[in-house]
Amino acid sequence: MARDLRTAHHGWRRPSGEEPVRRTRLAQQAGLRITELACFEDHRSFRTAVTGEPDETVLVVSLIRTGGLVLRVGGREEFVDPTTGFLLRRGDDAAVAHLARLPDLSTVLQFHQDVHGECPGGAGPRVLPVDAGLDLAHRGLVAACRAGADPFEVAERANRLVAGLVGGREPAPCPRRASTVVAHRRLAHQACAALIDGLPTAGLEEISRLVGCSPFHLSRVFRAVTGRTLTGYRNQLRVRAVVEELGGGRPLRELAAKYGFADQAHLTRVFRQHAGALPKVVRAALRGTAPPAGTEQESSTPRPPPSPE
């Protein structure tokens, strides 16, 4: 009866002959792996926690989307469900038991240690609350991975999600000590320069390594100093670079490839968000010609300012 109830929810059915745990890779890049785990097991005894491949991972963050489990670490037991998440480090001896009949679906983020050995959240395993805002950020990250978002955006979304999980979603407050203010501004300026020099191929891990801090710290400081995200700033740089070339005859699909957009549609979407008009309308304006037919009315419609990314 338990198995029938467990497989009846949301159309979940364990395929015949397959393992009770199904892994789906959502993203893989330097310093970060994101995996979706679907667990069909229904066991109340504790078994070693499944967090993905061990390799060089030093920090594992697991966020539950459906179902629930009991996590045992160091003799302490905590119930984990979609309102909570847990953080493990290399060497933590963790085990899980499944009490709920609904299949467990979770997102596992595995981070590698950067050159400075910085990781968020202090030492030891932790079970942390996930409020509605963090849950939406989590699901937005999954959607971005499935939509093929570029690695830089995925990395920053992942780092901001974990930073929010361990320290709150709001940007770090402006520090009072003058020396810290200066240091943070210098760090943000160095990141800007690194993004300009590395456009469009440099990833978040590479940028943070160049400026000498962890991606978690860089993302929070950059937003606190500039009021915008690293991804938003990078997109603005990419849009400006495309505008610089729109007066020429290079096709948009070539410009999309040159500046790291997934395709021409992705370029058009980001361009319109930041420039308030379609690339072909801006191209016509730069050439002093009439906009292409069917775009005048659309491009003249007032656009709200782009939302923070």
Image: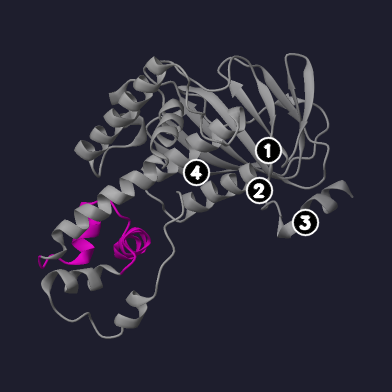
Q: Nearer the viewer, mark 2 or mark 4?
A: 4
Of the numbered discs 3 and 1, the one sitting upstream in the chain is 3
- Give how far apart the Cα atoms at labels 2 and 4 are: 21 Å
- How far apart in space, not on screen, are marks 2 and 1 (Cα)? 35 Å
Q: Amino acid under label 4? A: Arg
Please tell me whether mark 3 or mark 2 is closer to you in this view.
Answer: 3
Percent of width and height locating residue 144: 48, 51
* Point 57% across, 46% down: residue: 137
**Residue 19 appears in the picture as rendered:** no
Where does label 3 land, which residue?
Answer: 9
Q: Is residue 2 left or right of residue 117?
A: right
Of 132 and 78, nearer the camera is 132
- Tag 4's secondary structure? strand
Do the CB atoms of the residues marked 3 and 2 lie less than 8 Å apart? no
Q: Quadrant of residue 281?
A: bottom left
Magenta stretch? 248-277
First of labels 1, 4 by sequence position: 4
The colour mode here is one colour
Mark 2 vs mark 4: which is more N-terminal?
A: 2
Residue 230 coordinates in the image, percent (x, y): 38, 40
- Which residue bears the numbered disc 2? 17
Residue receiving disc 1: 130
Q: Residues within 10 Å of mark 3 (few under 14, many from 20)?
A: few
Q: Secondary structure at mark 1?
A: loop
The disc at residue 25 is: 4
Of residues 41 and 152, which is closer to you in this image?
152
Numbered disc 3: secondary structure: helix
Residue type at numbered disc 1: Val
Q: Describe the element under mark 2 as helix, strand or loop.
A: loop
Disc with the residue nearer the chain's start (2 vs 1): 2
Is there a contact, CB below 8 Å, between mark 2 and mark 1?
A: no
